[in-house]
C-alpha cells in the first residue's frame, strides 16, 4: 500500500486546557465528525487530514485526562484507548501528546505516564507563543533528548502552527519506533512509582525549562490577596458586580444603533412590498422577531468578554478554590464551579462539562442545578423587561440601577442553585465531602487576539442560533398568529380568532394568578425550544395585534411598559430565574444521566419553583400597589 493510500490512525491526548482540541480543529478543519463512544456518554471526535507527503491520517481527539489512573469516565476512556483495550476502537498507530508550554509542571507528569505505554508517540509543545510572551524558555532539543521521543513546537491558533508536527508525523508513521520505558527500569530504590514520576518531572523541568523569577513573584503576591479566605471573596464579588454594571453601561449605545437599524430596515421592506401575507411575514414576523433578539448581542458579548478575560488570566481556577468551602456546604464541590460557570453561557455545555467530576453524587447534583445558572438566552428577556420597567438612574451617584437589578437576578439564580443542592444533600445517604485538588496556572495578561477569537466564536454561535431555530419558530408563530383569519362580522381583533390566540386565551386560566396575559402565555410556548425566542415571539405577537400601523411600528419596549403592570413584569422576571429548561437541555440531561426519571424530576421541580416564585412575587407586588 502506498503512502498516499495508507491511513494512519493517530490519537491526540493531553490534559484539559492544553489546546488539544484547537490543534485538532487546525489539523482537520471541517473534515470531522462527532459521536459518542460505544456504551458511554463521552463525546467522540474524529477527523481526517493529509501530511505533506500525501499520507491520509485519521485523528481521534481523546477526552482530556490528568493521569492514566482514571478518576472519571473521561479519563477511563482515554486510558483504555491509549492502551489499545477499548472495545470497537482500533489501536492508534501514533500517540500525539499535547502539552501546554506555559504549564509543563503539570503536563510533563502525564506525558511520562504515556511514555511508559511503549507506543510510538510525538510530543507537541503547544502555546509556545504564549510562553515566549511570558518569558518562559523551553529547550525542546533537551526535552527530545531526555524523553527519547520527537518533540515539536505548535501554536494551535495560527494557520501554519502545526507544520513542523505534520513533517515529524510523516517520518514517525513511516518508521515507528516506540520509546524505551524508563521509569520502571530506572526507578530509584525506596521510591514508589508515583514518587519516581514526580522526581523525573522535576529533573526535566530543571534541565529544559527556564521560568522567569518575576512571574513567580507576581503569582505569589497576587495569590496572597486573591486567595485570602475573606478578601478573596470580596474581590470576587466586586468583580462580578462590576461586570453586570458594565453590561448595561457599555452596551446601550450599540443597542440603540442596532434597534434603529432594524426599525429602519423593517420600514423600508414594508414600504417596498405591497400589503399582504408576504409583507406581514417579513416585517411583523422575520424582521420584528430577529431584530428583537439581535439587539441584545452587545450585552451578551460584553458579558462573554469579561468571562473570557478571567479565564485567560488564570483567575477562574482560583475562584473555584475560593468557592469550594461554600459549595461543599451546599452539597457540591469546587469541581462544580467550572461546569456551573459554563452554564452561564448555556446549560448544555455546562452539563456536558460535569463529566470531569469524579464523584457520581456530585456530578448528578451539578447536572440538576446547572439550569438555574442564568444562561445567555435569558439575558435578552431580562434586558427587555429591565429596560421597560426599571428607570435608568444612578444609585449612590456611581451605580447603575438597571445593572443592580440584573446582578440581583444572576445572584438569585446562584443562591437558588445552592439551596436546591443543599436540599439534595439532605436527602442522599452519602454525606461525605470530597476535597478539591486543582493545579493553579500562572497569571497572564489575556492576549487581545485570543479574546477576539473567542468573542467571534460566541457571536457566530448566537447568530447561527438566531438564524436557525429562532427564525423557524418565528415563522411558525407568525403562521399560528395569522391564521385562520377573523370570521365575517367579527368584532374583536383578528388575532383573537387565530390558532395562537385561542391557545393563549386558554392558558390564561392557569397563568392569570401570576399576572401573565395571553400574549405572554403564547410567548412561553416557543420559549421551551429556546428561551431567547420569547423576545421575538412577543415582538411578533404585539406587531400583529396592534390596532393600527402606527402602533405596529413602535418598538416592543414602550408597548409592554404601557400595557403591563410592574407586578406582571417582576413576576415574569422571576419566572425566568427558574423557568423549565429548553428542549436541548432536557435532551442533554437524558443523554448524560441515561434516565428519564432525572429529566422528569428536573422539569418538575423547575416548573414548580418558577410557578410558586412568580405567584408570590405577583401577589406581593399587587398588595404593595404595583398591580
Image (cartoon, rainbow, N blue to C red):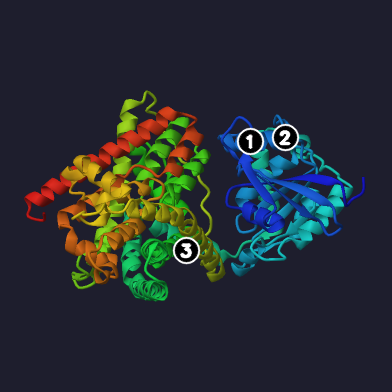
Q: Is residue 207 visible?
A: no
Q: Is residue 81 above or below residue 155?
A: above
Residue 269 rendering spot, x and y as whole percentages? 41, 73
Q: Secondary structure at mark 1?
A: loop
Kindly report the distance in space between the C-alpha atoms of the residues bearing marks 2 and 1. 9 Å
Q: Circle 1 is placed at which residue position?
A: 37
Q: Secondary structure at mark 3?
A: helix
Quadrant location, the N terminus: top right
Quadrant for residue 555, please give it: bottom left
Q: Which mark is residue 89?
A: 2
- Mark before the other along the chain sequence, 2 or 1: 1
Residue 527 rendering spot, x and y as whole percentages? 36, 49
Q: Which mark is residue 599?
A: none
Going 45% across and 60% down the picture, which residue do you hit?
A: 310
Going 57% across and 64% down the picture, which residue do you hit?
A: 213
Q: Which of label 2 and label 3 is nearer to you? A: 2
Of residues 211 and 41, the one drawn nearer to the viewer in this rendering: 41
Q: Residues within 10 Å of mark 1 (few under 14, many from 20)?
A: some
Amino acid at each position: 500500500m502506498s503512502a498516499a493510500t495508507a491511513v494512519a490512525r493517530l490519537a491526540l491526548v493531553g490534559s484539559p486546557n492544553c489546546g488539544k482540541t484547537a490543534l485538532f480543529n487546525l489539523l482537520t478543519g471541517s473534515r470531522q465528525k462527532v459521536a459518542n463512544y460505544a456504551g458511554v456518554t463521552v463525546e467522540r471526535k474524529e477527523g481526517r487530514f493529509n501530511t505533506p507527503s500525501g499520507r491520509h491520517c485519521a485523528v481521534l481527539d481523546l477526552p482530556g485526562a490528568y493521569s492514566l489512573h482514571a478518576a472519571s469516565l473521561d479519563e477511563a476512556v482515554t486510558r483504555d484507548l491509549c492502551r489499545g483495550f477499548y472495545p470497537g476502537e482500533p489501536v492508534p498507530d501514533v500517540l500525539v501528546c499535547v502539552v501546554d508550554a506555559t504549564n509543563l509542571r503539570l503536563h510533563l507528569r502525564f506525558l511520562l505516564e504515556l511514555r511508559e505505554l511503549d507506543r510510538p508517540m510525538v510530543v507537541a509543545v503547544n502555546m509556545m507563543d504564549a510562553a515566549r510572551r511570558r518569558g518562559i524558555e523551553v529547550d525542546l532539543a533537551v526535552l527530545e533528548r531526555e524523553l527519547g521521543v520527537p518533540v515539536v513546537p505548535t501554536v494551535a491558533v495560527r494557520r501554519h502552527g502545526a507544520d513542523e508536527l505534520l513533517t515529524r508525523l510523516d517520518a514517525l508513521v513511516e518508521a515507528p519506533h516506540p520509546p524505551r520505558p524508563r521509569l520502571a527500569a530506572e526507578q530509584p530504590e525506596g521510591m514508589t512509582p508515583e514518587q519516581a514520576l514526580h522526581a523525573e518531572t522535576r529533573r526535566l523541568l530543571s534541565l529544559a525549562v527556564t521560568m522567569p523569577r518575576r512571574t513567580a513573584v507576581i503569582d505569589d503576591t497576587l495569590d496572597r490577596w486573591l486567595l485570602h479566605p475573606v478578601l478573596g471573596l470580596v474581590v470576587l464579588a466586586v468583580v462580578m458586580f462590576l461586570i453586570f454594571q458594565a453590561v448595561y453601561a457599555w452596551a446601550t449605545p450599540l443597542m440603540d444603533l442596532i434597534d434603529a437599524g432594524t426599525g429602519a430596515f423593517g420600514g423600508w421592506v414594508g414600504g417596498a412590498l405591497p400589503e399582504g401575507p408576504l409583507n406581514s411575514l417579513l416585517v411583523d414576523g422575520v424582521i420584528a422577531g430577529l431584530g428583537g433578539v439581535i439587539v441584545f448581542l452587545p450585552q451578551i458579548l460584553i458579558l462573554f468578554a469579561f468571562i473570557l478575560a478571567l479565564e485567560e488570566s488564570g483567575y477562574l481556577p482560583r475562584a473555584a478554590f475560593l468557592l469550594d468551602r461554600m459549595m461543599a456546604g451546599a452539597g457540591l464541590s469546587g469541581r462544580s464551579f467550572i461546569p456551573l460557570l459554563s452554564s452561564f453561557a448555556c446549560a448544555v455545555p455546562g452539563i456536558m462539562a460535569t463529566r470531569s467530576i469524579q464523584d457520581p453524587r456530585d456530578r448528578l447534583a451539578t447536572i440538576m442545578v446547572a439550569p438555574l445558572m442564568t444562561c445567555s438566552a435569558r439575558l435578552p428577556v431580562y434586558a427587555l423587561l429591565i429596560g421597560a420597567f426599571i428607570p435608568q438612574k444612578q444609585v449612590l451617584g456611581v451605580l447603575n440601577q438597571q445593572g443592580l437589578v440584573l446582578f440581583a437576578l444572576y445572584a438569585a439564580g446562584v443562591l437558588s442553585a445552592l439551596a436546591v443542592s443543599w436540599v439534595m444533600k439532605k436527602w442522599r445517604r452519602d454525606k461525605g465531602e470530597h476535597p478539591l485538588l486543582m493545579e493553579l496556572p500562572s497569571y497572564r495578561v489575556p492576549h487581545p487576539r485570543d479574546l477576539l477569537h473567542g468573542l467571534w466564536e460566541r457571536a457566530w454561535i448566537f447568530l447561527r442560533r438566531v438564524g436557525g431555530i429562532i427564525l423557524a419558530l418565528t415563522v411558525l408563530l407568525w403562521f399560528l398568529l395569522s391564521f385562520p383569519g377573523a370570521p365575517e362580522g367579527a368584532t374583536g381583533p383578528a388575532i383573537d380568532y387565530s390558532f395562537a390566540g385561542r391557545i393563549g386565551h386558554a392558558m390564561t386560566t392557569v397563568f392569570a394568578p401570576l399576572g401573565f396575559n395571553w400574549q405572554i402565555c403564547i410567548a412561553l410556548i416557543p420559549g421551551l425550544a429556546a428561551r431567547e425566542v420569547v423576545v421575538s415571539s412577543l415582538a411578533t405577537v404585539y406587531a400583529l395585534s396592534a390596532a393600527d400601523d402606527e402602533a405596529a411600528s413602535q418598538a416592543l419596549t414602550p408597548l409592554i411598559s404601557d400595557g403591563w403592570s410592574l407586578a406582571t413584569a417582576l413576576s415574569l422576571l422571576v419566572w425566568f430565574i427558574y423557568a423549565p429548561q429548553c428542549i436541548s437541555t432536557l435532551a442533554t440531561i437524558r443523554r448524560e444521566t441515561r434516565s428519564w426519571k432525572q429529566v422528569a424530576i428536573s422539569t418538575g421541580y423547575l416548573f414548580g419553583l418558577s410557578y410558586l416564585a412568580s405567584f408570590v412575587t405577583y401577589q406581593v407586588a399587587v398588595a404593595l400597589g404595583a398591580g
